[in-house]
Image (cartoon, grey):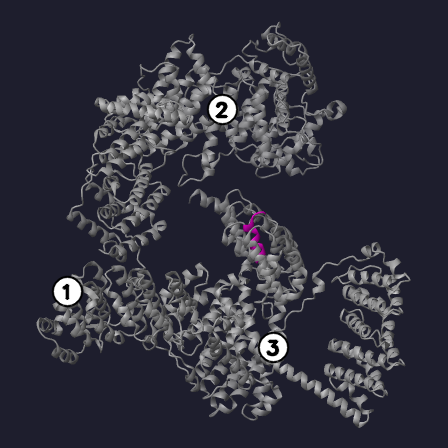
Amino acid sequence: MSEEEKLLKEAKKLPWDDRLFHKNWKVRNEANIDLAALCDSIADPKDPRLREFGPLFRKTLVDSNSPVQEKALDALVAFLRAADADAGRYGKEVCDAIVAKCLTGRPKTVEKAQAAFMLWVELEAVDAFLDAMEKAIKNKVSKAVVPAIDVMFQALSEFGAKVVPPKRILKMLPELFDHQDQNVRASSKGLTLELCRWIGKDPVKSILFEKMRDTMKKELEAELANVTGTARPSRKIRSEQDKEPEREAVSEVVGPGPSEESTGDAPLEIDEYELVDPVDILTPLEKSGFWDGVKATKWSERKEAVAELTKLASTKRIAPGDFTEICRTLKKLIADVNIAVAVEAIQAIGNLAKGLRTHFSGSSRFLLPGLLEKLKEKKPTLSEALTQTLQAMHTAGCLNLVDIVEDIKTAVKNKVPLVRSLTLNWVTFCIETSNKAVVLKLHKDYVPIFMECLQDGTPEVRDAAFSALAAIAKLVGMRPLERSLEKLDDVRRKKLSEMIMGSEGGTSTSASSATVKSSGVTAPSLETSDSSFVRRSAASMLSGKRPVQAAPGKQKGGSVKSGGSKKVDTTVQPKASKLVETPEDVEPAEMSLEEIESRLGSLIQADTISQLKSSAWKERLEAISSFKQQVESLQDIDQSVELLVRLLCAVPGWSEKNVQVQQQVIEGISHIASTAKKFPKKCVVLCLLGISERVADIKTRTHAMKCLTAFSEAIGPGFVFERLYKIMREHKNPKVLSEGILWMVSAVDDFGVSHLKLKDLIDFCKETGLQSSAAATRNSTIKLLGAIHKFVGPDIKGFLNDVKPALLSALEAEYEKNPFEGASVVLKRNVRATESTSSVSAGGLDSLPREDISGKITPTLLKSLESPDWKVRLESIEAVNKILEEANKRIQPTGTVELFGALRARLYDSNKNLVAATLTAVGNVASAMGAPVEKFSKGILSDVLKCLGDNKKHMRECTLTTLDSWLSAVHLDKMVPYITAAISETKLGAEGRKDLFEWLTRQLSGLSDSSDAFHLLKPASSALTDKSSDVRKAAETCISEILRVSGHESVEKSLRDIQGPALALVERLKPHGSFQESFESRAISMGPTSKSISKAGKSASNGVLKHGSKATSRTIATKGSRLDSIMSQDISVQSQALINVKDSIKEDREKLVVRKFKFEEPRPEQIQDLENDMTKYLREDLHRRLLSPDFKKQVEGLEMLQKALPTIKKEIIEILDILLRWFALQFCKSNTTCLLKVLEFLPDLFDSFRDEAYTLTESEAAIFFPCLIEKLGHNIEKVREKMRELTKQIVQAYTAAKSFPYILEGLHSKNNRTRIECADLVGYLIDHHVAEISGQLKSLQTVANLTAERDGEIRKAALNTLATGYKILGEDIWRYVRKLTDAQKSMLDDRFKWKVREMEKRNEGKPGEARASLRRSVREIGSDVAEQSGEVTRSVSGPALSRRNFGHSEPHMESQLMPHVLSGANGPTDWNEALDIISFGSPEQSVQGMKVVCHELAQSINDPEGGAMDELVRDADRLVSRLADKVAKTFEFSLTGASSRSCKYVLNTLMQTFQNKRLAYAVKETTLDSLITELLLWLLDERVPHMDDGSQLLKALNVLMLKILDNADRTSSFVVLINLLRPLDPSRWPSPASNETFASRNQKFSDLVVKCLIKLTKVLQSTIYEVDLDRILQSIYLYLQDLGMEEIRRRAGTDDKPLRMVKTVLHELVKLRGAAIKSHLSMVPIDMKPQPIILDYIDLNLETLAAARMLTSTGSGGQTHWGDSAANNPSSATHSADAQLKQELAAIFKKIGDKQTCTIGLYELYRITQLYPKVDIFSQLQNASEAFRTYIRDGLMQMEKNAAAGRTPSSLPMPTPPPASLNVSSPEFAPLSPVHTNSLVDSKSLNVKSEPTSFNLPPSYTEENRLNNATRGLTENSMVDQRNERYISGVTSGTLDAIRERMKSMQLAASAGNLDQETRPLMYVSDNVNQAVSGQIPRASENPLQSGVLPMDERALSGLQARMERLKSGTIEPL
C-alpha cells in the first residue's frame, strides 16, 4: 500500500472536521465524497447528524482546490436534499461562502452552486439566498454576476413569486441595467421579463422604467410584446411537497373538471402595492404650506393646497402616520361651497385610501357618512369622483361591509333618492368584488335592507336593490334568499329570479368559453413556462437569444407572421378541436361508489365489494382475488368494463397501502384491458395517475408496466403517451418521471413509433426529460431517444441541436447502441383497436414532422434569386439553406415548385461559385423533402447532371454531392431516365462521363437488384468506344454492375440494341459466373479509393449481397453532403482507435534510417514501405484518405488528425517517424492546398511535443529536416513564410546546435531561394543562439563564400548574415572568414561599417560588446574543446527538461573530479566573462567558465597577500549564487543521459570556494539558503545514484556540505537551517516522485537539516562567541511562533525531530550562556501579549539546568516574568519552591495515572527522588488509594533496579509539556513549569558528574545517526573533537530592566555624539564588563580559571559587538 493510500485510510478514522479541513487535498476530497454519500443515505430530516454537518460547509466551500470545492458542493446538495427547513439557520453563512468562491469557478462548479441555491430556496431560506444575491451582483467580476442573475431567474420561474419575493429582486435590478458588461445587462432584461410573467407588465413598468435609460426602455418594450401566457410554479418548497401528493392523488381519482383546471392554471396575482417602498408624505406636506392653504378664504388657494395633497398621495404606497387632522380637514372640505375644492378633496381621500390601505380604515369609516351624504350632488365631476373614491376605499381594504352596516342603513333611508340608489350601487360593487366567505357573513344583515328597498317608490332604487340581491345570489346561491323571496309578490319574485338566472347563465357561458379558451390557448403557454423552468440562463428570455425549444410557446403570433399559417392550421387546430370535440368520450364523469354498486348489480358479489372496503388488508387481499376470479369467469365484460375499473379505482382505490393488494388490483385492471374487445379511453384516464405512481414503486413496477402495455395494446400507445406527458411533467416524485420514461422505452421497442406523435414525444424528451436535475431521468430519456433513433434514423438529431454538448455526446453513444433499422424492425406487439389504424403514420423517417415552408418562399426571395447583383443572389441561396435549417431539414413539398424554378436558373449562373452554392442548396432541398421531390422538382435533375460537364473538378465534386443527396430522397430507379440522357449528352465531356460512371458504380454496388438499371446498359456500352481510356475503363466497370443487378430477361432484351465492339464486350461480361470476378477486378482497377467498395462486394455471392451487409445499410442511410456519404462508409471503423501502436517498434524502424544532412528524393520502394507502414498503424478511414491521390481526401485526413491531436499525442510520438516520412513526401508534391494544410498542422504538432516535453530523435530529424530545408525555397511567398516559421520552431525544440548542420547543408542547394533562406536562418541562429553554435562558427566560411555568387539576392543575404555575426562577435568574425578575395573583404568592410552606424543610431553599443563573455568562450575555450573532442557542443536552452529521446552520449569524459586548470585565462575581464558563461551558457559551456574560475581561485589562494583575494571576496557571493543556480541545471542535464562532467565541475568549484574561509564567510545568507537547499535536495534525489559516476557525486555532495558548515558564517548557517526545518515548498523539488508523497520527502529533508544542525550544535561551545546569538534566538522565536502553542502541544507527544532539534539548540545556548542569554533578546518582541513562546522555554531550561546542578545560581533563580510589570508587582516575579514542587509532582502523578505515559511518569518521579532526597512524595498521596500508593512504591523500586543496571527508558518518547504560563494545570496547584520533562535533556546529560558541562545529544539522535542513507558523510566525516576545557557560567539575578536601561543610555550617548567609531569596541567591553551586567561576565582582570569563564579576545567579542552596534545605531526595532 502506497503512502498516499495509507494516509487516506488513516484519515477515514478522523472526525469529520479534521477530515474536511485536512492539509492534504485528497483527504478533503474523499471526506466530501463520503459526506455526500452519508447525507444521501439519511432518510430522516431530523437526524442529529445533519445538525452536526451544517456548520462545516461555510469552510469547505471556500477550499482553494477546485476539485475539492466541487465535491464540497456535491456534499452540500446532498445535505440540503436530506435536511428540512431547520437547516435554514446555516443558510446565510453558506450562501455567502458560495457567492465568495464558487460563482467564478468552472462551469460545472457554477452549475452545482446554482443547484445549491435552489435547494436553499426549497428549504425556505429565501432571505439568506437573496442577501447573498445582493452581494453577488455587486461583484466586480461580471463572470460571477451573470450566474447570480440566472439563479434568481430560475428560482422565480420554478418556485414563483409567493416563495421568492419580487420586491427584493426589483430593488436589485436598476443597478444591473447600467452594468458595463453586456451579458449582465442581457440577463437583467431576461429577469425583468420573467418578473412580468409573474406580477404583470404594468407593475414592472411603473416601478422600473423610470430608473432606466431610454435605450433600455425601448429594448424592453419590444421584448415585453413577446411575453404572453401566465406563469405557474413548477416546484414546491419542501414543507408543501410533503402535503401535496395526497391532495393531488385524491383530486385525480375524482377527476378534475374544466373549472378546476382553469383555476389551477390561473395566474398568481401579485399586488403591486407590496412591491414598492412606502413614501413619507407628511413631511413634504408640512413644508408645502398645506395647513395655511386649506384655511385660506380664496377657493383657488384652498384647491391648490388640497391639490398638493392629492399629488403627494398619488404615490403607490404611503408610509403610515397620523392622518387624523388631515382627515378632519378633508371632511370639512368635502362640504366646501366650491365644487372644485370638494372634488379635489374627494380625490385626495381616494388617493390616501389607495396608498394607505388598511392603515386608512379608521379614517375611512370617519369620512364615509359625509361621502355618502355628498352623493346627492348631481354634478357629473363630483359624482364620478365620489364613485371612484368609494370604490377605491373598498378595493383597498379600508372598508369592510360588515362594519359599515349602520352607515348603509342610514344612507338608504336618506330622503334624497339619488343617495339611496348610488349607495346601493356601491354596495353591489362591493359584494361583486368580495369573496364568497365574506358575503356569507354579511348577507343576513344586508338582505333585509335590500328587501326593504325593493318597496321603494323610486325605480332606480328598486333596480339597484334587485342588482344587489342578484349579486348575492351569484356568489352564495339561492338558499340564503329563499325565505326572503317568500315575502315578495309574484311580479317582483319573477323579476328577481330572471335577473339571478340571467347572471348565472352569463356566468356559465363565460366560464365555458373560458374553459375552451384556456384549453386551446393557455396550454401552449404552459408548455412555454415549463420549458422556461429548466432554462438556467435569464438571457434566454430575450427574443434574440431564445433557444429553439421556446419557439412553440412564444409563436402565438410570430409563426403566423413569418408565413407559417398553414402549419398552424394543420398542427395546432386539430389539437384544439380534439380537446373540444371529445371531452365526453375521454374525460370520465363523477360517479359515486353507491351508483357504481347499483349499476354493477349482481355482476360482482356483494360480499366481495364489502370486503374490498374492509380495513383489514388480508380481507381486502382475499376480496381482490375473488374479484379477479369472478371477472375471469365473465363471458362478456365489454358492457361492464368502465364500471369494473371504476370499482377498483374506488375500492380499494389507488391510496391502498398494502403491496400485495396493489399488485392484485393492477393485475385485475390489466386482465380487463387485455380481454375486453373495446376498452374505453375513460378507463385509461381513471387509472393512469395511479398506475404511473405504482411504476415509481419498485415493488409494483413490473405489474404497473405490464398494465400500461395492456392499455397500449387496447387503445394504442399514442393516447397513453399523451396523457402521461402531463402527469410525469407535473408529478413531484422524480421516480414517476424516470421510471415512466423507461416504460416508454419498452413501449417504443414493442409498438414502434407509427402510433406516436413524434414531435410531441421529442419535445417532451427535450424540454422535460433531458432538462431534469435527476440523473436517472436524463439517462432514461437518452435511452428513449436511442430507441426512437432505431426507427427514425439520424434525422432525429436535427431536432436536438440545442441540447447541451455533454448530453449530445451521451446521445451519440446511445445512437450507436441502437443503429437505424427503419422498416426492417420486427414489432413485438400490435394494437387491437381498429380506429387507431387511421392515425397510424407510415413510420420510419416519414413519421418525423415536416414543416411547411411555403410562407417563407416569398416573392421577394424569388426575385432576389434573379437579382443582377451576385452578392444578393448568393445571400438568397444562403437564405434558402437557412430556411431548411430552421425546419430541421424536414419540409413539406407545398410551395417549392417556384423555388425549384428559381434555383434551376441559378445552375446556369455566370459566377461558378454561385453555381456550386446552388448545387448544394438543391441537394439540401431534395434530402429535406424526401420522396416527393421527384414530383415537385420539375426535372431540375437533368440540369444538375449537366454541371458534370464543367472542366473544374471542384464543380463536378459539388454535382456528385448533390446526386448523393438526391439519392437519399428517391430511389436510383427514379433517376435512371435523367442519367441515361446525361450519358448521351455530348457536352458532358470525358471527365464528367468518367465521374458519372464511377458514381453509378458506387451506387449500384450497394444494390442487390434494380428493375430499371438495364436502361443504362445501352448508353454505357456506347461509352466503351469512347476516345478516353479513363471513360472506357469506368464504363466497363459500370456495365459489370449493371449486368449484376439487372434481371436475365432484361439483359437479353437490351442486347438487341447493342452493336459493334460493345456487344462483344458485354457478351464477355454477361455470364453470371463472371460477375463476381469482374466486380473484384473493378475494385483493383479503381485503386485505393475503392477499397471499401471491394470489401462490400466481397460479402456478396452470386450477385446478391448478404443480409445486413455494410453496403446495404450504408446506401439506405446515405444523406446530406458527399462528405456525409464518405463518412457513412467509415461507420464500421469509427469505434476503432485512430492510431494502432500495438505492434509498433520505433527503435527498429529508426535503425534503418540513413542519417544524412543532404536531402534525396524518396524512391518508389521507400514510398511503398511508407504506404505499408501507414496501412499497418493507421485506422482504415485515415490511411485511405492520407494515401488517396485526391488532395481533398488528404486534407480531410489531416483534419481528422488535427482534431484528434490533443487526445493521441503519445500514439503520434510512437509513429512520428512514419508521419514525418509522409509529410516529407507531401513537400515533394506540387499540390499547394495540401502543402498549406501540412504547414498548418505541423506547428500544432510541435507545440504538442513541447507540452509533452518530447524532443525529436536524430533519426526523426534526419527524415524530415533535410526535406524541409531543401523546400524552403518554394516559389510561393506564403508557403516560404510558413516554412520559415516552422524551421525556427523546430530549431527551438531540437536545439540550434543540432539543427545548424542541416541549415549549412542548405547553403549548397541548387535552388537559389533555398540558399537565401538558409543564409537568413544562419543569421537568425547567430543573433539568437550564438552560445549554442559557438563550436561550429567555422562554418561561417561557407556563408562568406556566397558573397562571390552572381545572384545579387544571395550576396545580399550572405552579407546581412555576416553583418549580424559582426554585431554579435565583433572583430573575431574575421577568424572564421579568412579565405576571401580582396573584393569580398572590401564588401564585408563596407557592410560592417554600415552595421556600426546602424548600431550607433539604435544605441546598441559597439560590435561584440553584448556578447563579450561568449566571445571569450568561443575564441579561447569553446572552439578548442570542440576541436579536441570532435563533437558538436550540446546545449539545453532554458530549464533542462527530462526528455524521452535524448539519444546522444558523452564520448569525452573527465576521469577526475578536479578539472585541468587553464593557464591562459587571467585578469578580471576573464573572471567576469567566466561568470557570464556560467550564468547564461549551457551546462557543457559553463564547464569552460568554471575552469577559469578554478584557475583564478587557485592563484589567489596561493598568493593570499595579493590584492586578487580582496577582489574575489567581493565577488564571492555572486559566484556562489550563480553556481547554486547551475547545480540544478547540470544535474537535470546529466539525468537526460548526458555526461556528469558538468556536475563534477560545479561541485568542485564550490568546494574550492568554501575551502577558503574568507570566501566562505563572504557568502550572504540568502545565497547560502539557496545553495544548502539545492545540495540537500540532490542528496535526497533517488536518481543521482543511477547517474554517470553517481556514487562519486553523492560523496562530493556530502563533503561539500560539511565544508560549508565548517567555513561559512555560522550565524547564517544556523538561521538558514532553522528556517529549513519548516515544510519545503513542493515547487522546489527537482521533480515529483512517482511513488513518494511530498510529506515523506519533506520528512527526509527535515532529517537531513537536523543532522546539519547537530553538526553545528556539537561545536557550539567552542564557537559561541563567533555567532550572533540575537539572530539565532530570533529565528528560534519565529519558528516557535509559526508553530503556535496548539501545534507544539500536538507534536510534543510524537517523535517530531525538527521541534526537538530547535529545543536542543535553545537548550545548548542556555546551558552555555546561562542567564546572560536574556541579554541577547534584542530582536525578540519581549513585550508582546501574550508573551513569546521562546521566553517560557528559556525559563524552563534555566530552571531545569539549575535543578540539575549544571548552573550555579547566584540569585533568585528562575526569573519567569519578562515584562515591565516585575518592578510594579514583585510578588508575581517569583514562586516558592514548595509550590513548584507540588505542581511538578501533580503533573507526574497525572502521567502515572495514564496507561500510555505511566512509565515516563515513574521515571520522572524517580529522578525527583534522586534530586530531592529529603522530600516525602507520599505526603502528596494522602487522598490516593492504597493500591495506587503500592503501585508507585513498586514502580520506584523497579526504576532503581533499572538505573543500577544501566537501563533507562530512553527509547520511549518523553514529550515536553507546554511551559507553565501557557498551560492550564490541575486546579489544586498553582501553575508551574515541570522541572525534568525536557525531551532533549536525557538522564545521561542531566546526571553527568565528571563533566557536567559536556554536550551530549539525546539518544534518539545518536541512534538515528546509524541509519544508512545518502547523507552518511554528514555524520562520519570531519567531525571536530570536543574540548575537555569546560566552564560553568553563573546564573545571575540581573533582570531585563537593567539591560533596557543600558540600551537607552547607549542610544542617548550615540545621539549626543559621545561615542567615537574607533573607541567603540573598547568602550563596549569596559561597559559590558564593569557596569551593565556585572554579575554575568567577570572582569577581564580576574583570573579566568577562577571565574570559570574563558578570556574573551577580540574575535570572541565580535558577535556581542555586532549586536550592541545594532542597538546603539537604533536599526534593530522590536518585531
Can I make out residue 1604 in this image?
A: yes
Query: Is residue 145 part of the magenta span, yes or no?
Result: yes
Q: CA distance from mark 2 to mark 1?
A: 92 Å
- Observer-side mark, 2 or 1, equals 1
Query: Is residue 900 part of the magenta span, yes or no?
Result: no
The residue labelled by disc 2 is 1654
Q: Position of residue 1611 (x, y in %)?
A: 53, 20
Upstream in sequence: badge 2 or badge 1? 1
Magenta span? 140-150
Residue pictured at 41% horizontal, 32% vertical: 1580
Q: Position of residue 829 (x, y in %)?
A: 39, 80
Q: Position of residue 1485 (x, y in %)?
A: 33, 26
Given contact means CB atoms under 8 Å apart, are the residues at marks 2 and 1 in contact?
A: no
- Observer-side mark, 2 or 3, equals 3
Q: CA distance from mark 1 to mark 3?
A: 74 Å
The residue labelled by disc 1 is 1033
Given contact means CB atoms under 8 Å apart, are the residues at marks 2 and 3 in contact?
A: no
Q: CA distance from mark 2 to mark 3?
A: 87 Å
- Left or right of 1350, for residue 497: right
